[in-house]
Image (spheres, rainbow, N blue to C red):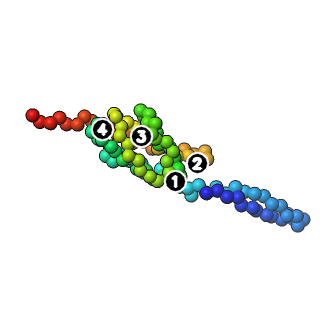
Amino acid sequence: MSGLTRVTSRDGRGRTFACALAAVALGGCNFGIAGFRAEPNVICGGSQTMLSWVATTDGTLSAVPADASLGAVAETGTRAVSPAGPTTYRLTVKRLWKTATREVAVEVVAAPSEAK
């Protein structure tokens, strides 16, 4: 949320001056990512993991290797993903000149073979 506050003051001669001050209150005083996790963080190939996060503002999800299905996200949410191999997921949030980033790694292992 952002707003504009008008401030008026008088000088010693009784003249009134008005100034506009920007009041920025995006995410309050605390800014950043409170939590970002993958559950489970070790999966068998072809399985899903659930990414979940809580941040102070909307952000962007990305991955290495790249995943075109990711992108802009709300400040709080979940996303099911099915990585083909080991993947690092990154959540980035920005506010004015500040940036916060968190990463989680998901390991993909081969399904156990059946006993013969």
**Mark toward the start of the polypeptide (4 vs 3):** 4
**Mark toward the start of the polypeptide (4 vs 1):** 4
Q: Position of residue 31 (x, y in %)?
A: 53, 52
Dot 1 alpha-carbon crowd within 10 angstroms: few under 14, some 14 to 19, many 20 or more: many
Q: Is residue 13 above or below residue 67?
A: below
Q: In this figure, which residue is indicated by the disc labeled 2? A: 95
Callout 2, which amino acid? Arg
Relative horizontal placement of residue 72, taking residue 43 as reference (left or right): right
Residue that appears at 36% across and 37% down? 83
**Mark toward the start of the polypeptide (3 vs 2):** 3
Q: Are marks 1 and 2 in contact (CB under 8 Å)?
A: yes
Q: In this figure, which residue is indicated by the disc labeled 1? A: 56
Callout in the foreground (4, 2) = 4
Dot 3 alpha-carbon crowd within 10 angstroms: few under 14, some 14 to 19, many 20 or more: many
For residue 2, which quarter of the picture?
A: bottom right
In terms of secondary structure, where does tag 1 sit?
A: loop
In terms of secondary structure, where does tag 3 sit?
A: strand
Q: In this figure, which residue is indicated by the disc labeled 4? A: 46
Residue that appears at 44% across and 34% down? 66
Q: In this figure, which residue is indicated by the disc labeled 3? A: 89
Q: Quadrant of the C terminus?
A: top left
Q: Position of residue 33 (x, y in %)?
A: 47, 50
Callout 3, which amino acid? Tyr
Relative horizontal placement of residue 67, taking residue 85 as reference (left or right): right
Callout in the foreground (4, 1) = 4
Dot 4 alpha-carbon crowd within 10 angstroms: few under 14, some 14 to 19, many 20 or more: few
Callout 4, which amino acid? Gly
Q: Is residue 94 above or below residue 2?
A: above
Callout 1, which amino acid? Thr
Q: CA distance from mark 4 to mark 2?
A: 36 Å
Q: Position of residue 106 (x, y in %)?
A: 34, 40
